[in-house]
Image (tube, grey):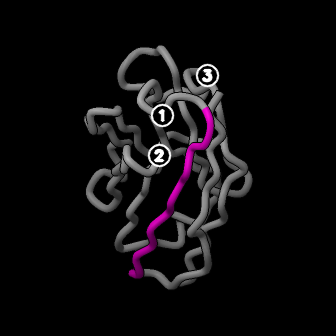
Amino acid sequence: QVQPVESGGGLVQAGDSLRLSCVASGGTFSSYLLGWFRQAPGKEREFVAAITFGRTTYYANSLKDRFTISRDNTKNMVFLQMNSLKPEDTAVYYCAAAGATTWPPREETEYDYWGQGTQVTVSS
């Protein structure tokens, strides 16, 4: 099984950019779709973006103009580049891996393995 571990969160100002990283150790990296979710205080966890091994991507409509997901298959890593950050982007960001599932995997239940999350705080 694969174990995702996120990094790269922090405190930034509105308008700044931030790049999150996730390394997925264990398992066969090529077998998994990878996704990012986020959970803001008092809200449910929501889908952000997903990417296949072949680098086909899918985004939440509200984020696709500012966020970019990518992966480095040689390093078992997935990234989330976030630009023009807003205070409403403040959340814990989670990396997750999905085995056999439908595309696009927008639901939490489609993912098998989750990281512990990394906090992103955007000040106004």
For residue 8, what is the image quadrant? bottom right
Give the spatial CA distance, label 3 vs label 2: 22 Å
Question: Which amino acid type is marked by label 2?
Answer: Asn
Q: Is residue 55 above or below residue 83?
A: above
Query: Which residue is drawn at the image coordinates 55% and 51% (left, top)?
Result: 23
Front residue of 118/76: it is 76
Main SS category, magenta section: strand
For residue 115, what is the image quadrant? top right
Question: Which amino acid type is marked by label 3?
Answer: Thr
Front residue of 39/82: it is 82
Dot 1, crowdedness within 10 Å: few (<14), some or many (≥20)? many
**Quadrant (top left/top right/bottom left/bottom right) for the N terminus:** top right
Query: Which residue is drawn at the image coordinates 51% and 59% (left, top)?
Result: 21
Question: Which amino acid type is marked by label 1?
Answer: Phe
Q: Is residue 113 above or below residue 102?
A: below
Of callouts 3 and 2, which one flags the residue occurring earlier in the amino acid sequence? 2
The residue pinned by badge 3 equals 109
Disc 3 secondary structure class: helix
Q: Is residue 40 left or right of residue 75?
A: right
Query: Which residue is drawn at the image coordinates 61% and 56% (left, top)?
Result: 6
* Residues at circles 1 and 3 in contact by the CB criterion of under 8 Å: no
